[in-house]
């Protein structure tokens, strides 16, 4: 095992990432075999299935990338799902009821997410509130704001064929009769930017250091509040971007929802190697973790089961990964 880990290619890609890629491949093979057995005349091996997995991973990926920064500081954000819905509801209402330009409404999506990120960051860092309590409160506020703004009515964004439906091309675009996953390419580009921020900039280094030893960083003269606030701002902004890809896939947004996406986003992040205790984070791992979550969601539905089974499996995976991370830290210490 140690020889494999020391291999030049393995070290460059990352042993944990290779394991995750192997898990994704094994799960895909498993669902390919089980789906026809559970539902005769049904196949899992198709381009439409792959496309559905990638489309789900698009908005979920941006949520997970955002919460990676927060968890890297040792905090948590349970508001990202409702914030995504709130952003989609507010901007969608302005688009459909007020006739605002689509481009302006897409910017509003991002701004709403950023505002919630700023709010969470200031309350946690300068207000001294626990991130758990702050994000739970923000989750309820986001649900309430979205419901009040739209008068508890659902909002339907334009279909692809309607005027202003061009935003759906951000998710996929037809070329030669095939839907090309443009959204996944945008997600990869966004992940590359996040990786540079986290691993190659002063901001990213301070965010990771805060998660490792906040007090030591503070005593060294670093303004920890500023950099920790930035992590929450990035998280909120990426939740706003996720809202754009969510409506590109689903078009209709209902108020008062979004909680379940918190769990999937955090699960993908933790599964990808980001430590819940802070100080260790992997953007590439987060991406692969999200693809595994998306595959689980599609595979369980393809076999005819409800999404509740996905929650059970995801919860078990998170428990195992967090337990393994804690054991690994204890051994190192």
Image (spheres, helix red, strand yellow):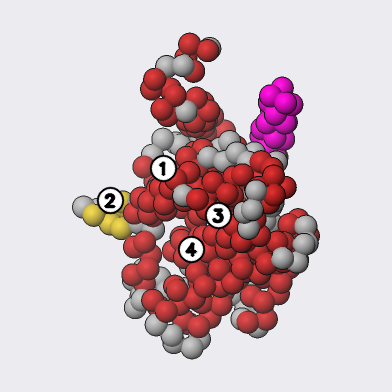
**Residue stretch rendered in magenta on the structure:** 314-333
Whether residues under marks 1 and 2 lie with C-beta atoms below 8 angstroms apart, the answer is: no
Q: CA distance from mark 3 to mark 4?
A: 10 Å
The mark closer to the camera, 2 or 4, is: 4
Q: CA distance from mark 1 to mark 3?
A: 24 Å
Residue 324 is a magenta residue: yes
Quickly name the residue at label 3: 66
Residue 107 appears left or right of 182: right
Q: CA distance from mark 2 to mark 4?
A: 25 Å
Which comes sooner in the sequence, label 4 or label 1? Answer: 1
Which comes sooner in the sequence, label 1 or label 2? Answer: 1
Vertical side of 182 occupied by 23: above or below: above
Residue 51 visible in this rendered orientation of the protein: yes
Which comes sooner in the sequence, label 1 or label 3? Answer: 1
Quickly name the residue at label 1: 50
The mark closer to the camera, 2 or 3, is: 3
Q: Residues within 10 Å of mark 3 (few under 14, many from 20)?
A: many
Vertical side of 3 occupied by 238: above or below: below
The mark closer to the camera, 4 or 1, is: 4
Residue 170 appears left or right of 135: left
Which comes sooner in the sequence, label 2 or label 3? Answer: 3
**Image location (x, y in percent) of residue 208:** 59, 45
Q: Nearer the viewer, residue 103 or 68?
A: 68
Q: Nearer the viewer, residue 221 or 310?
A: 221
Quickly name the residue at label 4: 241
């Amino acid at each position: 095992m140690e020889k494999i880990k020391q291999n030049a290619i393995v070290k460059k890609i990352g042993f944990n990432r290779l394991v995750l890629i192997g898990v994704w491949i094994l799960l895909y093979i498993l669902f390919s075999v089980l789906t026809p057995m559970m539902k005769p005349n049904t196949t899992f091996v198709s381009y439409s299935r792959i496309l559905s997995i990638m489309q789900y991973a698009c908005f979920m990926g941006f949520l997970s990338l955002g919460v990676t920064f927060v968890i890297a500081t040792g905090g948590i954000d349970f508001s990202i799902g409702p914030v995504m819905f709130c952003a989609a509801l507010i901007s969608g209402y302005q688009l459909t009821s007020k006739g605002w330009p689509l481009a302006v409404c897409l910017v509003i999506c991002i701004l709403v997410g950023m505002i919630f990120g700023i709010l969470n960051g200031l309350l946690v860092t300068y207000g001294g509130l626990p991130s758990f309590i702050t994000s739970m409160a923000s989750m309820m506020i986001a649900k309430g704001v979205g419901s009040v703004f739209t008068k508890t009515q659902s909002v339907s964004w334009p279909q692809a064929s309607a005027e202003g439906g061009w935003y759906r091309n951000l998710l996929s675009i037809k070329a030669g009769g095939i839907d090309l996953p443009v959204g996944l390419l945008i997600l990869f580009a966004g992940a590359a930017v996040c990786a540079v921020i986290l691993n190659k900039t002063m901001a990213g280094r301070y965010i990771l250091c805060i998660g490792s030893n906040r007090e030591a960083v503070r005593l060294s003269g670093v303004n920890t509040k500023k950099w920790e606030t930035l992590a929450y701002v990035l998280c909120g902004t990426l939740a706003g971007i996720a809202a754009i890809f969510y409506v590109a896939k689903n078009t209709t947004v209902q108020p008062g929802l979004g909680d379940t996406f918190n769990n999937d986003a955090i699960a993908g992040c933790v599964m990808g190697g980001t430590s819940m205790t802070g100080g260790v984070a992997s953007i590439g791992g987060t991406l692969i973790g999200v693809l595994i979550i998306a595959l689980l969601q599609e595979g369980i539905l393809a076999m005819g089961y409800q999404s509740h089974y996905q929650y059970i499996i995801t919860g078990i995976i998170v428990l195992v990964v967090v337990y393994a991370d804690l054991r690994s830290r204890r051994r190192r210490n």
